Image (spheres, rainbow, N blue to C red):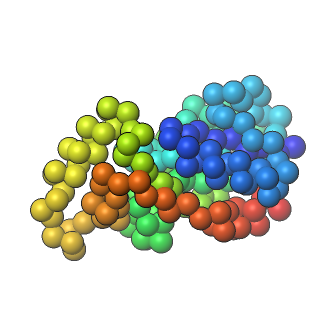
Amino acid sequence: MKIIIYASQYGSTKQYADELSKRTGIEVVEYTEVRDINQYDTIVYLGPLYAGSIMGLKKTLNKIRNVQDKKLIVGTVGLADPNDKKNREEIMNGIKQQVHGCIYNKARVYFLRGAIDYSNLNLKHKTMMAFIHRKVKGMKEEEMTAEIKAVIETYGKNVSYIDFDALNPIIDGIQ
């Protein structure tokens, strides 16, 4: 059996999860609603990136027993350019800190680009983004990470980088 599990704060990851379900016919469930993850042999987890970690990943995947018998796919959704090598390395380090080593080694990881709408951010996230923006505004471009560049490019705006074609490698990985 296969399942798509997702976490979503503002909706980008849910959009990807719903589209992936539509394209594959696989059931999609929010991570807080998963009852018995061990009944599935293929587990696709999609989660948004926040401050170096993936929402819900640790809570969900660390419940898996018999990892060697599972196909694990993790899709990260963030604002920064997923083609930036350093960005990918930072994401992989974040995953390594969140899950057991056997899960980290077994999972195939894919990088998706999300969206942001500042008018929908909660007060905590608006404050955090304003702080980051003020802190990095004067940085030289060569010092900026992909994440910092994304904050500067999108600050105060409604921007979507969602690309459902980016799901194709995940679909291939599920097969």
Image quadrant occupied by the N terminus: top right
Image quadrant occupied by the C terminus: bottom right
142 relative position to 169: left or right: left
Percent of width and height locating residue 59: 57, 31
Tag count:
0
* Rendered residue at 73%/54% (across/down): 20
As drawn, the residue found furthest toward the left would be 138
Picture quadrant of residue 8:
top right
109 relative position to 87: left or right: right
Q: In the rendered image, is residue 52 in sight?
A: yes
Q: In the rendered image, is residue 78 in sight?
A: no
Percent of width and height locating residue 37: 75, 33
* Rendered residue at 42%/44% (across/down): 50
Q: Give 134 or 38, whichever is nearer the viewer.
A: 134
5 relative position to 175: left or right: left
Q: Give 61 or 65, whichever is nearer the viewer.
A: 61
* Rendered residue at 30%/54% (across/down): 155
Q: Is residue 39 above or below residue 137?
A: above
* Rendered residue at 60%/58% (across/down): 109
Percent of width and height locating residue 145: 30, 64
